[in-house]
Amino acid sequence: SCPTSVDLWISAARLESSATHFNQPTRARAILERSRVYVPRNPRLWLEAVCLECDSPDANAGAEQMAAARSLLARALQECPKSGLLWAQAILLEPRAQQRKTKAVDALKAADSSDPALVVVVARVFWAERRVEKARAWFERAVRADPDYGDAWAWWLRFELEQAADEKQTQTQLQRVDQLELACAKADPHHGLVWPSVSKDPLNARLSTKDILHKVAQALGSTRQL
């Protein structure tokens, strides 16, 4: 038994929440609550619990889902007040652009402002406002802060590919994509919320870092941009 393994607790909760013979995530909630007894003050376990509420099929309405998620996140931030991961989620849960901007300012003051998970979400806030140069600068800041955080590279690639489509594949924009791919390959990242699940998939064992980068960016395509 490995009661302090965060990955095992999260995997167990996800197994329960995705099982077809359950129509509500009650057992997944119980697993995550128990996990926080064995591994207290762990941002990833709190984040998983918050995301479970966001995705829960047993809430009566979207507003109720968000209220439950925000309540849980408030408890999480009390226990882990400097977690960039949790502050990033707090920004994402805000329903309006101005509220997200305000929350981002609060997050950068309260948490480690170099946390790549937080910096990426700040970049996404600028992206949503179509402040392209600002967004690009913050994506670059994220990968400089932690080149091993693969999700930051993938979000940046998704951003640059969208700009390439908007600009009808201009040479300058295509060069940006090429440079990003080369920089990511050199950094050879291994961590993130999404990156490991793609890079460790046996089906992807022979893929290059560039291929993994594109697959992760595609996986993030199912995540709503702000």
Image: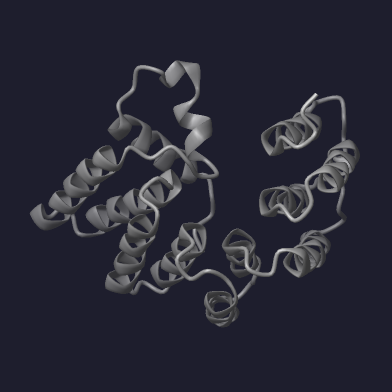
Q: Is residue 8 left or right of residue 111?
A: right
Image location of residue 75, percent across then percent down: 81, 66
Residue 223, compared with residue 64, is above or below; it is: above
Task: Say whether residue 153 is visible.
Answer: yes
Image location of residue 62, percent across then percent down: 77, 60
Task: Say whether residue 169 is visible.
Answer: no
Q: Could you tell me which residue is drawn at 57 percent across and 63 percent down?
A: 84
Q: Quadrant of the N terminus?
A: top right
Q: Could you tell me which residue is drawn at 45 percent across and 47 percent down?
A: 151
**Quadrant of residue 14 in the image?**
top right
Residue 142, compared with residue 28, is above or below; it is: below
Q: Could you tell me which residue is drawn at 84 percent across and 38 percent down?
A: 28
Image location of residue 147, percent across then percent down: 35, 49
Residue 90, compared with residue 196, is above or below; it is: below
**Quadrant of residue 170 in the image?**
bottom left
Residue 55, compared with residue 83, is above or below; it is: above
Front-most of residues 25 and 195: 195
In the displayed image of the protein, which residue is found farthest to the left? 171
